[in-house]
């Protein structure tokens, strides 16, 4: 088994690792640390929780240990959320605690930049940043990147998900071409693959399998419902008190406000958070949600990135995302740290093709809940083009058939737990409307606000 002492890491770093209580390197550390120390580019498929932060920060700290903060920024780490930026900054503090000349700064949006500017003025070798604030302070002349040796792009797929891809392309234009690049992403959607190919030179690819993926950990349910009935279905589901702390995703800010209004009218304590709300209003809502004063938080994808609540019982996709990776990120908000979580998706006829793409990505079918008072009658819909399922169903799953989506009863069900299949196993119907399918290829522009 590999030990940290097998790596040619200098004594002050070895001591910091020991102080942190790490006994052995994680798989990504075992594979990445020697390669990064040798100057190689890395393409890492890994999620938070695998120890990837130490995998890239330890060799970077070693690489800059002999430089002075006066020599300019040597390493730039770009990460999608302020929480991650802060976490990475904390790790750097831990690992560089026995090196007096290593200084770093963490910058992110949504707060007054003056203290960030002051730390930049004092000089740092490592800068951890979210994209918006980085570009902002760079354009104001507070950040000079011409001395850069290392560029780390962390959680690249989440960047895409949050609409930061253009910011990343802009960042690539302001950093030197000659550099070492470390690129991390949990998934590799096409656009991220293209970005990686553009950014990396002969990279070493490291893939770290997850113990269990989000899709496996989270119980997922699908409700076919007409668009106009979604509000009623939401109120109905929230009558079930086991839905303790619920994050509802809407596509637009306006939609988030509308859902909050509907719920408050129905006497369900709820608040919406999105880019049009002030930072104070967002934090107030978040605090109330964490304190369980409000039960439901409604958010857009961008706003949800700041939500760091560990004990979400349910995620509800009031509207399904047209980008399948967004679905995985959304449902990953529940069932964190091995906890059980439930993700409920409302699907109107226009969203059916999104389900096909989501199921292809997660490589499983979402359990359809057919029995609910607002179940959409399959017969009343414009004739969908039914295509064979992408994989052959196992005999135990029975035959997916459009008839199985028909509601058995119009009586309200108690909660979201009832499944539609006769044999108690997930049943599901695949509808695929060709016209929809091609039109959804062009992704709707995701909401994009600065960090
Ligand atoms: P990360 O995936 O970088 O977010 O790391 C997840 C957690 O694992 C953090 O709390 C780290 O401090 C911790 N960690 C990282 N490397 C090790 C290690 N080799 N042994 C034990 N814990 C570690």
Image (spheres, rainbow, N blue to C red):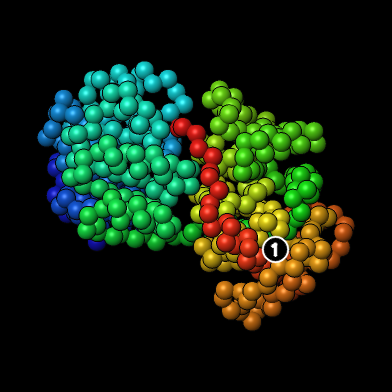
Q: How many marks?
A: 1
In the figure, 432 relative to 151: above or below? below
The reply, left or right, for residue 57 in relation to residue 333 is left
Q: Residue at x 58, y 29 (%)?
A: 276
List x then y, in percent, for residue 335.
56, 51
The reply, left or right, for residue 201 in relation to residue 234 is left
The reply, left or right, for residue 213 in relation to residue 409 is left
Location of residue 104 (image quadrant): top left
Q: Residue at x 44, y 47 (%)?
A: 160
Q: Which residue is the extreme one toward the left?
A: 66
State the residue position of label 1. 368
In-front residue for pair 215/25: 215
Q: In the rendered view of the protein, which quadrant contains the N terminus?
A: bottom left
Location of residue 98 (image quadrant): top left
Q: Residue at x 68, y 34 (%)?
A: 257
Label 1 within 8 A of ligand 1 by Cβ: no
List x then y, in percent, for residue 210.
42, 59
Q: Residue at x 32, y 53 (%)?
A: 196
| Any part of residue 221 in sight | no
In the figure, 21 relative to 99: above or below? below
List x then y, in percent, for residue 304.
55, 39
In the figure, 375 relative to 104: above or below? below
| Any part of residue 166 in sight | yes
Local SS, label 1: strand
In the figure, 250 relative to 98: above or below? below
List x then y, in percent, for residue 341.
60, 52
The reply, left or right, for residue 2 in relation to residue 139 is left
Q: In the rendered view of the protein, which quadrant contains the C terminus?
A: top left
């Amino acid at each position: 088994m590999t030990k940290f002492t097998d790596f040619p890491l200098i004594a002050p770093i070895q001591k910091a690792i020991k102080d942190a209580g790490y006994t052995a390197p994680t798989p990504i550390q075992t594979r990445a640390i020697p390669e990064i120390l040798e100057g190689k580019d890395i393409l890492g498929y890994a999620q938070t929780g695998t120890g990837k932060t130490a995998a890239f920060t330890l060799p970077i700290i070693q690489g800059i240990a002999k430089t002075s903060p006066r020599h300019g920024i040597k390493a730039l780490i770009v990460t999608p959320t302020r929480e991650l930026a802060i976490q990475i900054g904390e790790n750097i503090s831990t690992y560089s605690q026995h090196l007096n000349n290593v200084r770093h700064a963490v910058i992110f949006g949504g707060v007054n930049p003056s203290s960030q500017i002051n730390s930049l003025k004092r000089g740092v070798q490592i800068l951890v940043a979210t994209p918006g604030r980085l570009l902002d302070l760079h354009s104001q002349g507070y950040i000079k990147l011409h001395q850069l040796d290392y560029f780390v792009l962390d959680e690249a797929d989440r960047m895409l998900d949050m609409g930061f891809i253009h910011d990343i392309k802009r960042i690539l234009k302001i950093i030197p071409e000659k550099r070492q690049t470390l690129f991390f992403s949990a998934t590799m959607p096409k656009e991220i693959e293209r970005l990686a190919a553009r950014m990396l030179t002969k990279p070493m690819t490291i893939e770290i399998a997850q113990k269990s993926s989000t899709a496996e950990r989270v119980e997922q349910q699908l409700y076919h419902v007409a668009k106009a009935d979604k509000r009623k279905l939401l109120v109905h589901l929230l009558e079930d008190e086991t839905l303790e702390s619920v994050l509802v995703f809407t596509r637009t800010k306006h939609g988030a406000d509308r859902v909050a209004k509907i719920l408050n009218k129905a006497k369900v304590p709820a608040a919406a958070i999105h880019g049009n709300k002030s930072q104070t209003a967002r934090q107030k809502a978040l605090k109330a949600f964490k304190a369980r004063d409000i039960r439901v938080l409604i958010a857009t994808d961008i706003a949800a990135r700041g939500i760091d609540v560990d004990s979400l019982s349910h995620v509800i996709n009031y509207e399904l995302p047209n980008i399948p990776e967004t679905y995985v990120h959304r449902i990953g908000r529940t069932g964190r740290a091995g906890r059980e979580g439930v993700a409920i998706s409302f699907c109107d006829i226009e969203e059916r093709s999104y389900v096909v793409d989501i199921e292809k990505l997660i490589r499983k079918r979402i359990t359809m809940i057919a029995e609910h008072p607002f179940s959409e009658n399959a017969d009343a819909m414009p004739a969908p083009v039914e295509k064979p399922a992408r994989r052959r169903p196992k005999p135990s799953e029975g035959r997916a058939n459009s008839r199985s989506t028909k509601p058995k009863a119009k009586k309200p069900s108690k909660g979201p737990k009832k499944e539609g299949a006769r044999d108690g196993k997930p049943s599901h119907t695949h509808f695929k409307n060709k016209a929809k399918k091609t039109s959804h290829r062009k992704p709707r522009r995701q909401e994009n606000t600065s960090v």
